[in-house]
Image (cartoon, grey):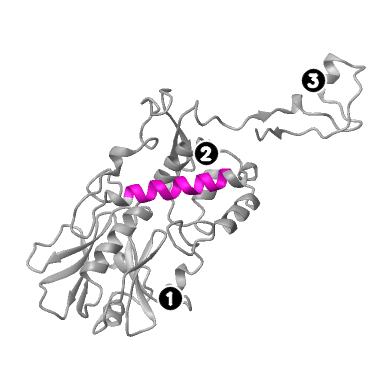
Amino acid sequence: MPELPEVEVVRRGLERWVSGRTVAETEVLHPRAVRRHPAGGVDFAARLQGHTIGTARRRGKYLWLPLADTDASILGHLGMSGQLLVQPETAPDEKHLRIRIRFADDLGTELRFVDQRTFGGLSVHDNSPDGLPDVIAHIARDPLDPDFDDDAFHTALRLRRTTVKRALLDQSLISGVGNIYADEALWRSKLHYERPTAALTRPRSVELLGHVRDVMNEALAVGGTSFDSLYVNVNGESGYFDRSLDAYGREDEPCRRCGTPMRRRPWMNRSSYFCPRCQRPPRVVTASRAVSSPGAVSSTRAASSPRAVPSPGAVSPVRDES
């Protein structure tokens, strides 16, 4: 699924080729492409006709085109395979063309939404006071946003009581980071994906955030990451940051830092890639190593040492944060 760099590449293309143009006509060719627009395809087309497209904007993985003379925006979600293409009006239709937007000018190009798997789509929504479509007003700022609050991020990270990769993918905490760039930033930070966020010091979270920004900016510079033909920019061109990945997709290949074979582990219906030497998992102290509570004797200790006197403390798994 496209992450921040891929969506930003598309946004820049829309800003160059679509912003400032007035919609003449819209064709909805597949109902699933507007399923997030409750009033349906006819209403979607009517909401666009005669309106001018404002400057393309993005937050995290979401992008939108403000309708400059209204308080509404066209919200785009690319899903797994969605493409927003600026094509010559005379170009043959793509096999999976879902929506066509024509403009009232003589530039000879049109905007097409193409989606093989139909998980993405376009919809029109009223804007919040901050200028975002109201349905994404809860999405946090992304790390490339100049108004992103680093201190607030660190504080929220420590309070989450979760693990670091889960936190990076929490769009209410930080938006735009997905599986690929989370693995890359964690590898650069030498952090295991199951590291508890409560154990991260401020310097470590600052370092992690810096690596998140670095990897995203590097991906942006080469057009994002394309593993197949489904992710392209508005001109149909693929990115090639996949050639520079240090962690994601490199199972059994040598770590670029220490040479240890990289590993892959199933994680939340995805995969996590990491170096078992550079990114050591957090150690867990088992109950048998924990200190017993007053008056409580574990069955193991009772069997082996009936006369053992328990020490103060609680019997429970204890996580060593070192």
Q: Distance of mark 1 from mark 3, alpha carbons?
A: 62 Å
Q: Which residue lies furthest to the front in this view?
A: 203
Q: What residue type is labelled 1?
A: Gly
Nearest to the observer: residue 301 or residue 242: 242
Residue in the image at 52% along x and 44% along y? 207
Q: Mark 1 points at which residue?
A: 131
Horizontally, residue 262 falls left or right of residue 237, namely right
What span is colored magenta in the figure? Answer: 204-219
Q: Mark 2 points at which residue?
A: 193
Residue 276 position within the rendered picture, expressed as x and y whole percent measured from the top left: 49, 27
For numbered disc 2, what is the local secondary structure? loop
Q: Which amino acid does label 2 sit on?
A: Tyr
Q: Is residue 214 magenta?
A: yes
For numbered disc 3, what is the local secondary structure? helix
Characterize the local packing of mark 2: few (<14), some (14-19) or many (20 or more) Cα atoms within 10 angstroms: many
Nearer to us: label 3 or label 2: 2
Residue 186 position within the rendered picture, expressed as x and y whole percent measured from the top left: 48, 40
Across the whole image, how many numbered discs are drawn on residues? 3
Q: Distance of mark 3 from mark 2, alpha carbons?
A: 33 Å
Res 60 seen here: yes
Mark 1 or 3 closer to N-term? 1
Residue 168 position within the rendered picture, expressed as x and y whole percent measured from the top left: 50, 49
Q: What residue type is labelled 3?
A: Thr
Q: Name the residue under label 3.
A: 300
